[in-house]
Image (cartoon, grey):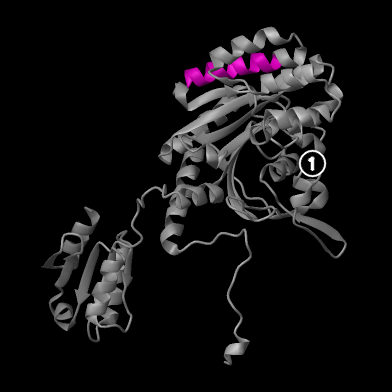
Amino acid sequence: MNNSNIIKPRKLPGFMELLPSKQVIFDEMMEKIKKVYKMFAFSPLDTPVLELSEILLAKSGGDIDKELYAFNKGDTNVCMRYDLTVPLARFVAMNSEFIDFPFKRYQIGKVYRGEKAQKGRFREFYQCDADIIGIDTLPLIADAECLNIADKIFDTLGLKIVNHISNRNILFGYCEDLGLADKTIDILIILDKLGKIGKDNALEELGNLNIDSEKANKLIQIASLCGSFDDILKILEPLSTNETFVKGINDLKEIFSYLTAYKLPKENYCLDIGIIRGHNYYTGTVFEVNLVGHPEFGAVCAGGRYDNLATYYTDKKMPGVGLSIGLTRLFDLLDKNEMLPPLEKRCVDLQIIPLGNTILHCVELQSYFQNNGIICEINYDNRSFKGKMKEANKRNLPFVIVVGENEVSSLKYSFKDMFKGTQETLSKEECLQILKNN
């Protein structure tokens, strides 16, 4: 082919792909998350990547509408899912008569957001979600269970965290008490970015909403409260008798009692009123998980309660609560900061190297070891024996069997322990015993 006709290989920005050595670690992290979800008796679910636009747009709002990948196919307007929560709400509304409630499901899949590709931001990424959906009511212990799950996941991943927990009713009620109920959503949008824009800019933006400086300062003061549940609740309680505000206080007290019963280390969570979450469907508990020592990473897990989401698709009241981990972003942050967990499971237990015309016997050996649970491959490359051994060392393979014509005749094989640098002549049964013990 003429070189001028070769298309330069490249990929779209914002889409991650990994070399196999790192993909294995990514997959192990995903499996650990899945294992925790299963431990808490969550069932698996897989929803379509494409949804009808009217479903995804029912209650998205904010910047999400601008980020949707949307297109028409004939007369049908469709969107690629931007999260896994809205499709879940659609699913339970469609299948409520066939599933048991509370419905506990986990889903791990790719989602798509057409935002500007930049450091730490992806257009395609894996989310690892767990949600609990009830009928009519859903006890607050479900919220606490999700907080407990988040703690267990990061403990399993070997990462130290602080879970910043709040309840949106605190700020909803406080805005009502200040006579600003009609401006609540706009106020929350400003307070949600308080940490990024700072107090002075927040005051200016609140002023642009015609909120006087006294009320604006009160809003910023309450949104800045962060500390232990005991300390922050003592500060909050005298601030308002508004019904919504008091409900938020009481919900936080109940959740704190469950976290105490779960025996979660108190250093692993705090009460942070500044946690608001951008999605409009959150109605109560909200939380964001940060890695200890790395505030620059931002939230690596987040979630909350959404009592009204499913009402867009059904007359039944289906309150829910859930958590989501952006695994692609988390992996990228750990990778770039040399914090990836070590590889725990070997990709290959054993490599068989044929010498001469022994490939058929090597295939029989491979089948024997594989049937006995050993991850085994044949090196059928045309390189020299020396080249194959050099490659085995480079790949950090633990064991190698060399099969020449003498080995085929005697059924005794040169078994090499690549880590110890030893070699023995053994039967396949003896080789298998060593492999199973390692």
> In the image, 401: left or right of 11?
left
- What span is in magenta? 247-262
Does 308 sit above or below residue 113?
above
Does residue 160 appear anywhere in the picture?
Answer: yes
Does 50 sit above or below residue 406?
above
Q: Position of residue 14 (x, y in %)?
A: 62, 58
Placement of the N terminus among the 4 image quadrants: bottom right
Q: Position of residue 197 (x, y in %)?
A: 68, 35
Taking the magenta stretch, the answer to whether it contains residue 254 is yes
Of residues 29 and 296, the one drawn nearer to the viewer in this rendering: 296
Does 138 sit above or below residue 339?
above
Of residues 178 and 147, the one drawn nearer to the viewer in this rendering: 178
> In the image, 394: left or right of 13?
left
**Mark 1, other Cα within 10 Å: few <14 / some 14–19 / many ≥20:** few
What is the magenta segment's predominant secondary structure? helix
Give the amino acid type for the residue marked by disc 1 in the picture: Gly
| Residue shown at 31% from the left, 84% from the top | 382
Does 128 sit above or below residue 307?
below
| Residue shown at 23% from the left, 54% from the top | 438
Q: Which residue is mark 1?
A: 61
Judged from the image, the secondary structure of the residue bearing numbered disc 1 is loop
Of residues 211 and 232, the one drawn nearer to the viewer in this rendering: 211
Q: Residue furthest front?
A: 200
